[in-house]
Amino acid sequence: MALKLEFTMDKETCRHSLNGHGVVMHSHHYLALITKLVEDLGDLGGPQILCEVVEESMRKILDDYFLKNSLSSVEDRCRAGVEYFSTFGLGKMHIAGDENGGKVRLTSSHVDEGWTMKWGPHSKPINHLTCGFISAIFSAAFNKPLKSYGTTETASIVTGQPESTFVVTALQ
Amino acid sequence: MTQQSVPTLIQEQPDNSLKGNLSLTNVTNLLQFLSMSSKRGVIELVRYPSNNEGRIYFVGEELVSAQSGVLTGIPGFADLLSWEQGTFHFLPDIACIDKTIGLNVQHAILEAVTLLDHQANEKAINQNSEVEEGGFSMEPTERDSSEVMNSLLEVPGVDAVVVVGRDGFVIESAGSSSRVNIEELGASLAHSINGIEEMGSELNVNNFQDMFIEYGRAVIMCRPVGDAVAAIITPDASKLGVIRHKAKKLFVELGQSF
Amino acid sequence: MTVMRDTVVKALAKVQVQSDENGLIPEYEVLVNLLPVSLLNTFSERIMAAAPPERKAEVEAGLVRAAYECGYHTGCGIITSEIFSDVVMPMVTEDEKDILRGAYAAFTAWGWAKSGIVQLKEAEKMTIRAFDYYEADSGGQGLRGFMLRGLSQAFFDLAYAEPYPDGMDTYICHQTKGLEVGDSYGEFVVVKK
């Protein structure tokens, strides 16, 4: 079942919403620099902050969507998560796994391709945003609390790999 | 009837005249009140502290004649409108032989205010050129736009004041906007002024300086303020003369913010 | 004729970005993304909160920089795009000034900030007023219009600095008022660096 998309605009403020949640457009320059910022602030826990914020924000959106559309199966929920990822222009995601964790591949990635377009390839994975997104999909799909899954990027388009790979692990 | 004979006539009749001080009202309001009450006669004015004298003759809504010192007609009337301190004395049923104006009172007020505007503009240009020649810069504005707009709201008859960018962006508004939708007013004004400026350009009559639009339920008066346009919304045209007169300085002040 | 804001807002507000078969949105010479406002605001606040006092300026500068570079590069793509050419350019009679008017109408239409130009001294200074912007909801303490600061600086650079891409960092934008601190509007002033 394709993701139901309802785009609306507030007449007074011109703010845009997707399925009732405010959204705004930015470019790969923005996300590349936000990613660079959290990398530079590694000593302050920058990558972890980005990852957690994405998980929290996406979890609310996914829970809301599942409820409104009565999505109860793990497959439907994962599919909705993947389609949200693409609708946001973040790339193409492929999920495999179960309640204990899994493996996620990105065959295209806004963050990685944006970074590469801006600065060229990088020596290590930088897609913290997608780590948070994947954790949100897994916890929402299996009705688990936030931070129930840890996601690690093990291969990355930004380092020259053809695909990015993420390993998802259920945390005790 | 000569002017010298007036006191004699007044003494012979019961005192049904109206007297007062210009600190309590102003010439525009007084004249509008009397003319709309279908009165006829002369308003005698004495200005403080100079003790200059002036006279305004009218019959109902027609302004017949005006005199301020040696100035007569609209220039004399315009001078009287600028008097803020002094006394007035209305003598009913006094007629004037010389008709130096002969216009509807509202029309005459507008003519006089326009003349005052031109005089003020010329004065400002002269002052600016003196300042430039002397190498001084203008003093920065002391009040921000919100304060100036609140002063505009205090002018009797003003419902709302809006400042709109040339693109129709509503920069600031103050007062009640129940008569018109302010956002839509911004867009509409920008479109109208564009058209009016294009017309001015085609006709080679210089830039737009003033615009009045009278609708059934509102009158909108606009002037450029800096690079933007200010609009005043008033319920009807009855106080347009006094609004225009009192708003003039405030519009100039507002222009320094935009 | 000058750029009529309502015309631009109505036309551009209808624009909807849609991802391709790769889940990407290539538009305006960049890859566009569509992110939840709550995510962006929460991130700004958390990263600011994580920084010790002596490093808050560094974090703030990083957030403004992200918006600036996004605005500079995407802005160039926007003002040379087909839709901008169709909707805005026919109304442009005052060159850069009108392009900036069109840009702020676009910012409004796309939900970044309901904003417009208050005063513009060409190539010198520009004052912007915003009556709504998503960062005003971030819940942090102090001025939070990082996005509009970056965008305003970027578009003034595009308008009056050296031609793209050589005009970066010619101007700077300061936020002087904010809805988030109780003012009735946000005010942003762009001046030469």
Image (cartoon, rainbow, N blue to C red):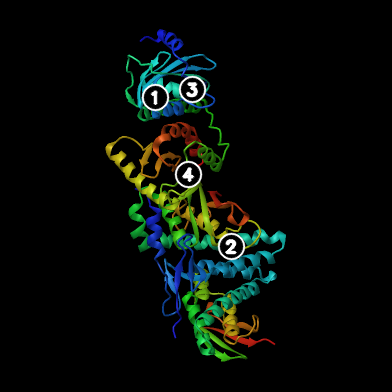
Nearer the camera: disc 1 or disc 4: 1
Q: Residues within 10 Å of mark 1 (few under 14, many from 20)?
A: some
Vertical placement of residue B66 versus C68, above or below: above
The N terminus of chain B, quarter of image: top left
Of residues B72 and C19, which is closer to you in this image?
B72
Q: Name the residue under label 2.
A: C137
Mark 2 and mark 1 residues within 8 Å of each other at the beta carbon: no
Which comes before the other along the chain, label 4 or label 3?
Answer: 3
The location of residue B118, given as percent across then percent down, is 40, 27
- Is residue B85 in sight in this rendering? yes
The location of residue A34, given as percent across then percent down, is 58, 68
Q: Is residue B1 left or right of residue B226?
A: left
Which comes before the other along the chain, label 3 or label 1?
Answer: 1
Of residues A58 and B223, which is closer to you in this image?
B223
Label disc, if present, on residue B39 of the rendered structure: 1
Q: Residues within 10 Å of mark 4 (few under 14, many from 20)?
A: many
**In whole angstroms, how far apart are the C-alphas of marks 3 and 1?**
22 Å
Q: Is mark 4 on a helix, strand or loop?
A: strand
Q: Mark 4 lies on which chain?
A: B
The type of residue carrying mark 1 is: Lys
The type of residue carrying mark 3 is: Trp
Label disc, if present, on residue B83 of the rendered structure: 3
**In whole angstroms, how far apart are the C-alphas of marks 4 and 3?**
27 Å
- Is residue B167 in sight in this rendering? no
